[in-house]
């Protein structure tokens, strides 16, 4: 065993963000451990003004405390769910001790940085009064309100400085088989992907999901009508994460027939050839009608000649009704895995769209739309399934908004009797 390589792998498990092109960035490791490093010594990776300060922000201890609010709570003494109002960075720091490595799934729908949201700086030496001014919640005598306009020179930097510490701290809360989903659009997709590669490690990237959030084209679009958002998906440790499968639909099951009355039940035929050529798997096959067939040029059969003969003996090869077709392998409905593998394209018919999310919120608040762009419950239900959340797992959403994630957790528990918890 290569001890050096083993130690390196252990370090990568603990600090994937300090690796650049599979080499340790020791300056960044020092920053992660709280040591000051000359910001002029930069390495390969996404850089922006203020990035070096992000590690200081992460290391800065929280000065806040969580105060229980019994009057606003429901079933305070028995509930295992938490709803916390506060600066999410402060709260993420406070959660480190109690929830380190305990969260199965994180979903966040952060500001998309379109220029309409307020991105406030993290500064913990300031008073609550100053904080309220930053967030636009207070209109005092020295009043000023601001939005993160594209004309500001640090448009992307301000957003990245806000996101980086929160994602860094959130990763600590995930279980080893935990996973995070982040909704985003084109404004910051490229930057967010690079930041997540750094924090979670490129090897823990699972997928970029395309969600069809709109189905009607906008005729006033300047070029193309934008109809989708992205959902970035990363695991804490991809070697320990297993994606959940989706329920099979009646339409999918209807594709399985039993035209030869096989006692094993309905089946569908699959291609017996593969594109990766191997001489061992390139051999002629004689059909029951006496016709000789070979794999197409550049292809070969997916099984050896010996295995093929076993499959024929077991009636698992289909030559067509007349016994004259190119052989195909029979796959029985009774033998396939429970559920189907999720794809990366999520259509509005299956998981809902923006308008559906708005209608759900309006229904709760007497037709008043208090939230911008709430995500539909069906979308969060799909995410929970793909995350493979079990009946006692914890789900975290630290940009809660309309609380679609919490709603989905309660709905899932009601349907299957589970005890999933949300924060």
Image (cartoon, rainbow, N blue to C red):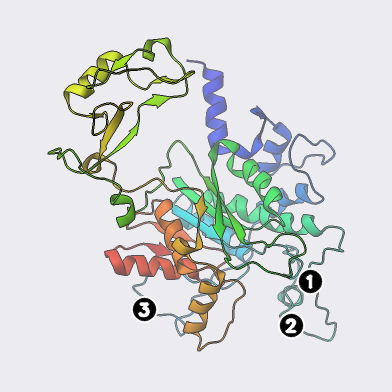
On screen, residue 378 above or below 314: below
Residue 312 visible to the viewer: yes
Point out the tag, 3 or 2, that comes first from the N-terminus: 3
Point out the tag, 1 or 3, that comes first from the N-terminus: 3
Residue located beneath label 1 in the image: 147
Which secondary structure, mark 3?
loop
Which secondary structure, mark 1?
loop
Task: Residue 140: give x, y in percent of width and height.
Answer: 80, 85
Q: Nearer the viewer, mark 1 or mark 2?
A: 1
On screen, residue 316 above or below 365: above
Crowd band around label 1 with a 10 angstrom C-alpha radius: few (<14), some (14–19), many (20+): some
Residue located beneath label 3 in the image: 75
Residue located beneath label 2 in the image: 138
Residue displayed at 56% across by 19% down: 4
Location of residue 270 (image quadrant): top left
Residue projecting furthest to the bottom: 366
Q: Give how far apart the Cα atoms at labels 1 and 3 are.
A: 38 Å
Q: Which mark is residue 300?
A: none
On screen, residue 330 above or below 166: above
């Amino acid at each position: 065993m290569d001890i050096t390589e083993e130690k390196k792998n252990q370090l990568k498990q603990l600090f994937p963000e300090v690796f650049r092109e599979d080499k340790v960035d020791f300056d960044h490791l020092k920053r992660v451990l709280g040591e000051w490093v000359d910001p002029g010594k930069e390495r390969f990776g996404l850089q922006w003004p203020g990035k070096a300060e992000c590690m200081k922000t992460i290391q800065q201890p929280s000065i806040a405390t969580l105060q229980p609010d019994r009057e606003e709570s429901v079933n305070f003494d028995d509930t295992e769910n938490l709803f916390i109002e506060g600066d999410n960075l402060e709260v993420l720091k406070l959660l480190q001790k109690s929830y380190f490595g305990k969260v199965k799934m994180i979903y966040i729908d952060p500001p998309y940085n379109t220029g309409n949201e307020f991105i406030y700086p993290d500064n913990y030496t300031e008073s609550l009064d100053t904080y309220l001014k930053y967030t636009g919640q207070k209109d005092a005598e020295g009043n000023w309100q601001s939005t993160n306009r594209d004309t500001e020179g640090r448009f992307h930097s301000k957003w990245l400085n806000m996101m980086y510490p929160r994602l860094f701290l959130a990763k600590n809360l995930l279980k080893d088989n935990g996973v995070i989903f982040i909704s985003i659009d084109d404004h910051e997709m490229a930057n967010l992907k690079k930041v997540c590669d750094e924090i979670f490690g490129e090897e823990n990237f699972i997928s970029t999901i395309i969600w069809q959030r709109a189905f009607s084209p906008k005729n006033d679009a300047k070029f193309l009508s934008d109809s989708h958002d992205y959902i970035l998906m990363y695991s804490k440790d991809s070697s320990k994460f297993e994606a959940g499968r989706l329920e099979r639909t009646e339409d999918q099951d209807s594709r399985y027939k039993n035209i030869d009355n096989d006692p094993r039940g309905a089946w569908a035929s699959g291609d017996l050839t593969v594109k990766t050529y191997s001489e061992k798997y390139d051999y002629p096959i004689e059909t029951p009608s006496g016709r000789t067939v070979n794999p197409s040029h550049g292809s070969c059969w997916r099984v050896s000649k010996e295995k093929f003969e076993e499959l024929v003996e077991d009636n698992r090869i289909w030559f067509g009704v007349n016994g004259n077709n190119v052989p195909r392998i029979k796959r029985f409905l009774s033998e396939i895995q429970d559920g189907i593998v999720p794809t990366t394209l999520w259509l509005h018919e299956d998981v809902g769209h923006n308008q559906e999310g708005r209608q759900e919120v309006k229904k709760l608040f007497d037709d008043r739309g208090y939230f911008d762009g709430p995500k539909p419950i069906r979308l969060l239900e799909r995410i929970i399934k793909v995350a493979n959340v079990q009946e006692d797992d914890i789900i975290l959403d630290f940009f809660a908004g309309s609380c679609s994630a919490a709603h989905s957790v309660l709905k899932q528990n009601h349907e299957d009797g589970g005890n999933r918890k949300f924060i």
